[in-house]
DNA sequence: TCCTTCTATGCAACTCGTTTCATAGACAAG
DNA sequence: CTTGTCTATGAAACGAGTTGCATAGAAGGA
């Protein structure tokens, strides 16, 4: 259900087309919520039919026309209502943890390269987040007195950074454990 | 797709019925993978049809009969194959982050109680994990020379603990930010 | 010239996951 | 004696999410 709300937030931050939303979901919003373009187009259509969004056909030069969506009044109301509802704290879903426990019934050493691959992927994400933080919040070109929206975006980004740092430390722990099992016993 | 594999791992650790699996998914396995009983029964049926599992009807006294599932040879093969395949590092899905960014278009102070609720829930989980660690791994009744399976279970649990600690610290950061926005500016 | 990439939108089929409902015997509390 | 909880299994319907396919013009490189 939160895809609708993530779209509302993103369109309130800036109106845009399905295509543009899909790219935002690969970047900033995608830090904490993913969606493919098919899913986005389908939900946009439904939300427009429900009156949550307004559409405007925008002709363009040198590229296909696009449909620019923006949040209508009922959309703002729906978002506000959702913000006031309690939600369940999420439960994690971690394939890698399943694999690690499964390694007890296979060769634990075979997992080492896989864990190293994850480590590299998370290092890349952390670098990406840190670059974004520098660019938008802590660097010299960041707006000096940040407004509420920027403060909130920053605290969410700090959450992503903390998550990646924690994950990297854990993956180090996992690697040390796998090496220990491989060498000894 | 990983539900199948989580079930294979759990049944290799100990054979059991769908009901028992559902309870394990509320406890240890549920630390990193959740599933409801309906989902489990459906997948068990399919896995048995595919020859990955064996079933045995177990009559019981004072309670309904149960079907005890155990992993068949093709199931072990399937798990081993999956363990050797690379998987994508997961992307996070965090409703609360959507809400926090959405708070820029609503009253940020209204989120404070919600964030505090999440803080309490994560504190509870952390306490639960730490109790489990004490009981199974670091306490006086834990098996003195742990085998590979226990080492791996422990490192997964340490991951859960690290996740909860990181989340609690981040929620403190979020609360401080919300209070700052509420008081000042 | 052809091949790829980028912008832009969408359908169809499928799998995964959740919610609701149903059954049924045993046992304990009120 | 009724209500609630625990064990145990399952059907049906729905909603969320993924994968594959299709279209189409513009731009840039081999």
Image (cartoon, coloured by chain):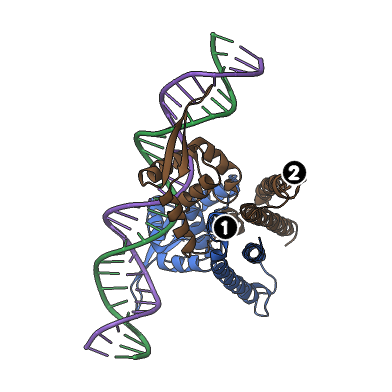
Chain colours: A blue, B brown, C purple, D green
Mark 1, Cα crowd under 10 Å, few <14 / some 14-19 / many 20+, is many
Total residue callouts: 2
Q: Secondary structure at mark 1?
A: helix
Residue C27 % position (x, y): 59, 18
Residue A161 % position (x, y): 64, 66
Instruction: Using the image, determine if residue D28 lies above or below residue A40.
Output: below
Q: Mark 2 falls within which chain?
A: B
Of residues B3 and A75, the one nearer the viewer is: B3
Inter-mark Cα distance, 1 to 2 = 24 Å
Q: In the rendering, which numbered label is found on residue A30?
A: none
Residue B128 % position (x, y): 69, 44
Q: Mark 1, mark 2: which one is toward the viewer?
A: 2
Instruction: Using the image, determine if residue B60 lies above or below residue B161.
Output: above
- The residue tagged 2 is B141
Of residues A137 and A49, the one nearer the viewer is: A137
Mark 2, Cα crowd under 10 Å, few <14 / some 14-19 / many 20+, is few
Residue at 41% x, 53% y: name it: A47
Residue A153 visible? The answer is: no
Residue A136 visible? The answer is: yes
Q: Secondary structure at mark 2?
A: loop
* Disc 1 + disc 2, Cβ < 8 Å: no
Left or right of residue A100, residue D23 in this image:
left
Q: Mark 1 falls within which chain?
A: A
Q: In the rendering, which numbered label is found on residue A100?
A: 1
Instruction: Using the image, determine if residue A106 lies above or below residue A83.
Output: below
Which corner quadrant holds the C terminus of chain A?
Answer: bottom right
Of residues A81 and B115, the one nearer the viewer is: B115
């Amino acid at each position: 259900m939160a895809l609708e709300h993530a779209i509302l937030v993103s369109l309130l931050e800036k109106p845009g087309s399905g295509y543009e939303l899909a790219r935002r979901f690969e970047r900033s919003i995608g830090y904490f919520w993913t969606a493919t373009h098919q899913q986005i187009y389908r939900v946009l259509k439904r939300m427009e039919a429900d009156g949550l969004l307004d559409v405007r056909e925008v002709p363009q030069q040198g590229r296909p026309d696009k449909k620019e969506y923006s949040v209508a009044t009922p959309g703002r109301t729906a978002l506000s209502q959702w913000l006031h509802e309690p939600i369940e704290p999420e439960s994690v879903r971690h394939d890698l943890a399943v694999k690690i426990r499964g390694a007890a019934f296979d060769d634990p050493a075979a997992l080492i390269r896989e864990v190293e691959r994850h480590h590299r992927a998370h290092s890349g994400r952390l670098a990406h987040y840190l670059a974004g933080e520098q660019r938008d919040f802590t660097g010299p070109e960041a707006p000096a007195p940040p407004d509420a929206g920027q403060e909130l975006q920053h605290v969410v980004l700090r959450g992503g950074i903390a998550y990646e740092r924690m994950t990297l430390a854990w993956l180090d722990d996992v690697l040390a454990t796998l090496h220990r099992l491989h060498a000894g016993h």
